[in-house]
C-alpha cells in the first residue's frame, strides 16, 4: 500500500509568530526547578502574592449561586458599571458602562483593540523598550510596528519631538505604557500632557494607553490617564486589568474603555470578542466588583512590599561594577544596562555579545533567569529585565550570584 505522507501546513502567521519571551523564560525556570535545579527566577512578570481572600470568596459565592451560564459578551452590567465608576473617580475619564469591554486578560483587550482599528499595511507606533506582545499583536493584524526608542538618560521615555517625527499618514495607533514593562519607569503627568498636545494635532491616530501597572508606583509621581484629556477623550482606548494590582494573573481578567464616537470601537471590540472567546468567565464578574470597589487596602499593602523590593534590588544591582541600573519608579521591573560586559568571555568560555547570550550564560552558569532586553524591541538589546515580584531572600541571593558571576567575566576593555 502506498504511503501517503500528510503534513499539516501552518499559516504564515502561525509559522512566523515568535513565542512570548517572558512566558518562555518563566516556563524554562519551572522546568529547571522541577528537575531539582536551584534556579533564581527573575523572569516572571507576576506578583508572588495570592489573590486576596474576599475576591476569591466573591467568585466562590457566585459559583455556588449558579452563575455558571453564558453572559453578555462585553461582561455583566454591574461589573462594567463598577469599572466605569472607577475610571471616572480615579482616572478622570468621562465614560459609562457601555464604553467598557471586559476580556480574558488585558492581553486580549489589547489584541481586540488592535484588531478593531488596524488594517494590514498601517503603522502602529510603539514606545520602546515596550512589552513583548505589542509588536507581535500588531504583526498579527498585518500592521507594521514603528519602534520609537526612548533614551536611557530620559528613563526610556519618548519626547514630544520623537513622537511628532514618527507620525505619518499611515499611522493608525500609538501604544504607550506607563508605568512601563520592561523599563520600570513612568511618565509624569506633564510629560504625558505634552505627548497629548502632539497627538491632539493628529486626529487620525488612536491612542492605546496600557495602564495595567497604574497602582504600582514607588516615586512621588501621580499616575495620569491620557483618556482624561478632553482633546483626546474620543480617541483614547484605556487598557487595564486585574492581574497585577490584585494578584490575579491566572484569573485572566482585563478591560478596555473606549468612550469615543458613540462607542464605535467598544462595539467593534465586543463584536470581535463575540466571535472569539464570547466573554470572560461568568463567576469572575462579582470578583471584579469586589476587587475594584473594596480591596484598596490589600493593593496598598502589596504596593508597599514591592516598593521595598524595588529599593533593595536597585541598591544591589547599582553596586555591581559595570552595571548601570535606572531606579525603578513603577511596575515591578528593573532594566539594567549590561552592555559593558559585551565582548567578554565567561568562565565556561561563552562569548557575551547580545542580551540573549548574556541571559543564556547567566542562567547556565549562575542559575539566575532574566529576560533578554531585545525581546522588548531592538533598542533593548543592551539591557536585561529582572522582575522583583519575588521575595527579598530571592533578590539577595540572585543579586549575589549575578555579582559574583560578573566579576569572573573577562572584559576586553575593562
Ligand atoms: N500589558 C502589560 C504592560 C503587561 O506587562 C501585561 C502582563 N501580563 C499585560 C498587558 C497583560 O496582562 P494580563 O493579560 O495578565 O491582564
Ligand atoms: N506581563 C508579564 C511579563 O511581562 C507576564 C507575561 C506576559 O504576559 O508576557 O512577564
Image: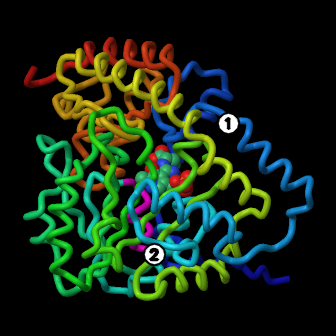
Q: Dot 1: few (<14), some (14–19), or many (≥20) neighbours within 10 Å?
A: some
Mark carried by residue 258: 2
**Residue tagged 1:** 52
User: Residue 292: in sight, yes or no?
Assistant: yes
156 vs 235, nearest the viewer: 235
Label 1 element class: loop
Does the stretch in magenta take in 135? yes
**Magenta: main secondary structure:** helix
Q: Is residue 370 above or below residue 394?
A: below
Q: Dot 2: few (<14), some (14–19), or many (≥20) neighbours within 10 Å?
A: many
Q: Quadrant of residue 357?
A: top left
Q: Is residue 25 above or below residue 80?
A: above
Question: Which quarter of the figure is the N terminus placed in?
Answer: bottom right
Which residue sits at x=51%, y=80%? 266
Q: Which residues are magenta?
A: 131-139
Does the stretch in magenta take in 34? no
Residue 102 position in % (x across, y down): 60, 67
Amino acid at each position: 500500500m502506498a504511503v501517503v505522507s500528510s503534513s499539516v501546513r501552518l499559516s504564515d502567521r502561525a509559522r512566523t509568530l515568535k513565542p512570548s519571551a517572558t512566558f518562555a523564560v518563566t516556563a524554562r525556570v519551572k522546568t529547571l526547578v522541577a528537575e531539582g535545579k536551584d534556579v533564581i527566577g527573575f523572569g516572571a512578570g507576576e506578583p508572588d502574592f495570592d489573590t486576596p481572600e474576599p475576591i476569591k470568596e466573591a467568585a466562590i459565592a457566585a459559583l455556588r449561586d449558579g452563575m455558571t451560564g453564558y453572559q453578555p459578551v462585553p461582561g455583566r452590567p454591574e461589573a462594567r458599571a463598577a469599572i466605569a465608576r472607577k475610571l471616572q473617580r480615579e482616572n478622570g475619564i468621562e465614560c459609562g458602562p457601555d464604553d467598557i469591554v471586559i476580556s480574558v486578560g488585558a492581553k486580549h483587550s489589547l489584541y481586540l483593540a488592535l484588531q478593531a482599528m488596524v488594517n494590514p499595511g498601517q503603522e502602529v507606533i510603539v514606545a520602546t523598550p515596550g512589552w513583548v506582545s505589542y509588536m507581535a499583536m500588531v504583526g498579527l493584524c498585518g500592521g507594521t510596528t514603528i519602534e520609537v526608542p526612548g533614551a536611557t538618560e530620559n528613563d526610556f521615555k519618548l519626547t514630544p519631538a520623537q513622537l511628532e517625527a514618527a507620525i505619518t499618514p499611515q499611522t493608525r495607533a500609538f501604544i504607550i505604557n506607563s508605568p512601563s514593562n520592561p523599563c520600570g519607569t513612568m511618565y509624569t503627568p506633564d510629560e504625558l500632557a505634552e505627548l497629548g498636545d502632539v497627538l491632539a494635532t493628529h486626529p487620525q491616530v488612536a491612542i492605546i494607553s496600557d495602564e495595567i501597572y497604574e497602582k504600582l508606583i514607588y516615586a512621588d509621581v501621580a499616575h495620569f490617564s491620557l483618556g482624561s484629556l478632553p482633546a483626546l477623550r474620543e480617541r483614547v482606548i484605556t487598557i487595564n486589568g486585574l492581574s497585577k494590582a490584585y494578584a490575579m494573573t491566572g484569573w485572566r481578567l482585563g478591560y478596555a474603555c473606549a468612550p469615543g464616537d458613540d462607542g464605535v470601537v467598544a462595539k467593534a471590540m465586543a463584536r470581535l470578542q463575540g466571535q472569539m472567546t464570547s466573554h470572560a468567565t461568568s463567576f469572575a464578574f462579582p470578583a471584579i466588583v469586589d476587587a475594584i470597589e473594596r480591596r484598596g487596602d490589600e493593593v496598598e499593602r502589596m504596593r508597599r512590599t514591592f516598593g521595598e523590593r524595588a529599593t533593595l534590588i536597585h541598591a544591589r544591582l547599582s553596586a555591581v561594577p559595570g552595571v548601570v541600573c535606572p531606579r525603578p519608579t513603577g511596575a515591578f521591573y528593573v532594566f539594567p544596562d549590561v552592555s559593558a560586559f559585551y565582548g567578554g568571555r565567561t568562565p565556561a568560555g561563552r562569548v557575551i555579545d547580545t542580551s540573549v547570550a548574556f541571559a543564556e550564560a547567566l542562567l547556565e552558569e549562575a542559575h539566575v533567569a532574566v529576560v533578554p532586553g531585545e525581546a522588548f524591541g531592538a533598542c533593548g538589546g543592551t539591557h536585561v529585565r529582572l522582575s522583583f515580584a519575588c521575595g527579598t531572600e530571592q533578590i539577595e541571593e540572585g543579586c549575589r550570584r549575578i555579582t559574583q558571576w560578573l566579576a569572573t567575566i573577562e572584559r576586553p576593555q575593562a
